[in-house]
Image (cartoon, rainbow, N blue to C red):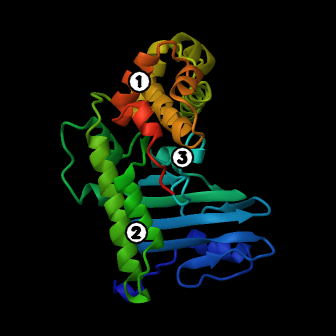
């Protein structure tokens, strides 16, 4: 099929424009002022690869029928959260940039909720098409399971500076209309590649199928843990609240997030320590005690292991704007 005849506007973008009584211009829908603000941009590069950039506020939530739900091929969703707004240190605790990576069984829905405040990037790719682009390593059960796409699976990766740089280039770099589609596709594929590289580094020997109830329980446990960074997590208590055994909780948590419960907790504990030292300019002792440390030497040691500098030295570093 000639490239110029392929419909490069995702169906869902056209549906949204119709619902808002507006139109798609240059792959984008501007939210009408009487209904909110912001924009939705989308590209259907091929029948195998789609990209949506959603950054808007609506006065009311909307429900759309999903025009792509009947896709005959399994797809993989890469959902980037909190990556379009410069969150900085002031909101690090509540708005941590991350990516959800899900197979068809966990992200296919017949309707799409268009929430009143959305700031995400979605990349959808045909699993069979992606599988044909490289040879999946036999040493990575995660990649094999993801590309086979026969089980309900979800993984989460934090967005580190190299990936954020690609996102910033995709969203903010001025590109002529001639190369806009080409540029966006290159960046979308680069993001997919970087995330698959990260997943390949995980150490899981076996991947377990998930159900929505287990996923919701694991995320509730995570949110509870991050809301109480001054108290180390107690596995038995988290497992009881999640209605699953401690063994299952630890196994599924590590499968989804790529880290043990305590290591994940400690990483975010130190991120919050860094935020308090710089954004709120609190003293080292205040921060250490606020985060549950009784021994400040131990706090300094753990902080150094995660951040790469002592807390006193870090507090003197001027935060980036």
| Residue behind mark 2 | 169
Q: Secondary structure at mark 3?
A: helix
Measure the alpha-carbon separation of dots 1 and 2: 36 Å
Horizontal side, residue 237 vs residue 305: left or right: right
Residue drawn at (43%, 44%) of the image:
158
Of the residues tagged 1 and 2, which is closer to the observer?
Answer: 1
Residue drawn at (51%, 77%) of the image:
9
**Few, some or many residues within 10 Å of mark 2 (<14, 14–19, 20+):** some
- Nearer to the camera, 178 or 138: 178
Q: Would you identify the image quadrant in which residue 32 lies?
A: bottom right
Q: Quadrant of the N terminus?
A: bottom left
Q: Is residue 127 visible?
A: no
| Residue behind mark 1 | 300
**Few, some or many residues within 10 Å of mark 1 (<14, 14–19, 20+):** some
Of the residues tagged 2 and 3, which is closer to the observer?
Answer: 3
- The image shows residue 262 at horizontal and vertical percentages of 44, 21
């Amino acid at each position: 099929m000639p490239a110029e005849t392929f419909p490069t506007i995702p169906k869902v973008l056209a549906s949204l424009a119709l619902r808002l009584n507006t139109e798609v211009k240059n792959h984008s829908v501007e939210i009408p002022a009487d209904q909110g603000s912001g924009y939705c941009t989308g590209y259907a590069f091929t029948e195998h690869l789609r990209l949506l950039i959603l950054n808007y506020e609506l006065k009311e939530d909307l429900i759309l029928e999903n025009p792509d739900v009947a896709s005959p091929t399994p797809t993989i969703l890469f959902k980037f959260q909190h990556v379009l707004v410069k969150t900085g240190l002031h909101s690090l605790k509540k708005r941590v940039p991350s990516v959800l990576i899900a197979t068809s069984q966990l992200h296919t829905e017949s309707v799409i909720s268009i929430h009143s405040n959305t700031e995400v990037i979605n990349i959808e790719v045909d699993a069979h098409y992606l599988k044909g682009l490289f040879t999946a390593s036999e040493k990575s059960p995660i990649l094999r399971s993801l590309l086979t796409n026969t089980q309900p699976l979800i993984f989460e990766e934090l967005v580190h500076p190299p990936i954020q740089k690609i996102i910033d280039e995709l969203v903010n770099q001025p590109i002529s209309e001639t190369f806009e589609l080409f540029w966006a596709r290159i960046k979308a594929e680069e993001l997919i590649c970087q995330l698959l590289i990260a997943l390949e580094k995980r150490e899981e020997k076996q991947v377990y199928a998930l159900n929505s109830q287990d996923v919701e329980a694991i995320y509730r446990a995570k949110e509870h843990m991050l809301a109480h960074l001054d108290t180390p997590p107690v596995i038995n208590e988290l497992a009881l609240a999640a209605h699953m055994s401690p063994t299952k909780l630890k196994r599924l948590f590590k499968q989804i997030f790529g880290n043990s419960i305590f290591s994940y907790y400690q990483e975010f504990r130190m991120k919050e320590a860094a935020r308090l030292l710089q954004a709120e300019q609190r003293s080292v002792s205040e921060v250490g005690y606020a985060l549950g440390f009784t021994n400040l030497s131990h706090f300094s040691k753990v902080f150094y292991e995660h951040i790469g500098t002592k807390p006193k030295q870090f507090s003197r570093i001027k935060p980036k704007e």
